[in-house]
Image (spheres, rainbow, N blue to C red):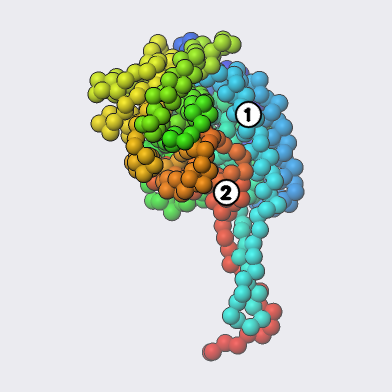
Amino acid sequence: MADQTGRGKTAELLIGGRTMAAKDGRTFDRIDPFTGEVATRAAAASLEDADAAVAAAKAAWPAWRDLTATERRKRLLKAADNLDSLTGEFISTGIAETGSTPGWYGFNVMLAANMLREAAAMTTQITGQVLPSGVPGNVAMAVRRPCGVVLGIAPWNAPVILGVRAVAMPLACGNTVVLKGAETCPGLHRLIGTALQEAGLGDGVINVILNAPEDAPAIVERLIANPSVRRVNFTGSTPVGRIIAQLAAKHLKPALLELGGKAPLLVLHDADLDEAAAGANFGAFMNQGQICMSTERIIVDSSIADEFVAKLAARASGLLAGDPRRSDVKLGAMVSAEAARRVAGMVKDAVDKGARLVTGGGVEGAVMQATVLDGVTPEMKLYSEESFGPVVSVIRVQGEDEAIRVANDSEFGLSAAIFSRDTARALRVADRIESGICHINGPTVHDEANMPFGGVKDSGYGRFGGTAAIAEFTELRWITLQTEPRHYPI
């Protein structure tokens, strides 16, 4: 059994401040993708457990809502410190559950703790305004107020960052939260609950539900349908995001969705090719390419393509994927052998249809080496489908206009990047790219706690981060104060 913090090889539910098993006693196992051993045995919540978590959050809401902004800030800052103190546990649990490297999980904790600190700073930035009224003696105000219970659904790929992001701003805005953890990393998401609970937020302010993979559809539907849940936020794949959006719409719940991506990186003819290759290498292969912002398409001007591809291949071929516990391994394993096989199938499809395998392509179990493909065309799956693996496609174009057309030739629109020495030109190109995020002379993978983060098209809607998130997790209310007698027509 787990200890009362939920740490260790067993992860239990957090409901109303209590660590507990599922009501019916069921559990599920998360398997280490590299060793094949049990990484975590987790409680498999029932529908009744989901109801109990929402009820606990609803009961805790009045007290949390009515705290002063400075007191909420104080407790969230304590939670950030707690998260930092648990870095070692997050690293060991993360390696076992999802197969990436210690550096990745250490970065996750660092950024997630900063997200909590940024959220803490936002507690005093939830402002309103006085509005001009046409009624004599009428003072009209627009004020933001907490919504109630917020459901956060987080994925496995950047587990600490995205788990914390699902709850930090909702809490800062005065809401209570139910975090539905990912089946792939139950220990990591439960550990977030530990950090927040031990910060003294209050019993029921943060609740964590874990569920077996086969139970996910029923648990999610039950949580969204609960009348006490007033907001939903989800980070994950576009197909699942569509389901979440439909359920939220059915129950008239506003939803914030951050979904899939097919990030383009444009290398214009005047780019610094060494910088572009470095940014592309990082953006394509960090965390085995399992990031929503990962560079999936490199759109390069034909005049410099040969030189650029050679520079990128030299970098990619020096990356070793393998046992994440080894110090010489830069990429670790993918989340599962099934995921590696799926990506390898996309590579084979591209090669069979004429793409050139420049480097990589090797797969052994859940391990796939960094892979660069040149000459990718629209007939290939890799041109349009999100790979979510350590593979990047090079697409050669003639000039700026074709580069923009190809960049926008995607159902996705999350992150993008442009490399050019001409900053005015790059800004002009960025203005024509259909994405929620665009970086000039930097990689597609870039996140900061205070930035408005989100996409367009099939990459979702709404924004996490900083002041932009306040509108997502508050109700805007119109309040008036009549200061003198009012004339009525009847």
Q: Is residue 144 above or below residue 218?
A: below
Query: How far across and down, in percent of the image, does residue 413 sit?
Result: 42, 42
Q: Amino acid at mark 1?
A: Val
State the residue in front, 142 or 401: 401
State the residue in front, 280 or 421: 421
Residue linked to disc 2: 469
Reading the chain from its start, which is encountered first: label 1 or label 2? 1
Q: Is residue 440 above or below residue 380?
A: below
Residue at horizontal 57%, vertical 50%? 468
Q: Quadrant of residue 266?
A: top left
Residue 52 in view here: no
Q: Which disc is residue 109 wearing?
A: 1
Image side of residue 222 versus residue 189, left or right: left
Query: How far across and down, in percent of the image, does residue 94 sit?
Result: 56, 21
Residue at horizontal 72%, vertical 45%? 73
Q: Which quadrant holds the N terminus?
A: top right
Image side of residue 204 versus residue 248, left or right: right
Residue 303 in view here: yes
Image side of residue 407 versus residue 167, left or right: left
Residue at horizontal 28%, vertical 33%? 378
Query: How far across and down, in percent of the image, does residue 91 sit?
Result: 61, 20
- Kindly state the secondary structure of the residue where label 2 is placed: helix
State the residue in front, 21 or 85: 85
Q: Quadrant of residue 86?
A: top right
The reply to whether dot 1 and dot 2 touch (C-beta < 8 Å) is no
Separation of residues labelled 1 and 2 (CA atoms): 21 Å
Q: Amino acid at mark 2?
A: Ala
Residue at horizontal 54%, vertical 35%? 442
Q: Is residue 397 above or below residue 247?
A: above
Query: How far across and down, in percent of the image, does residue 429 sit?
Result: 45, 45
Give the total of numbered labels.
2
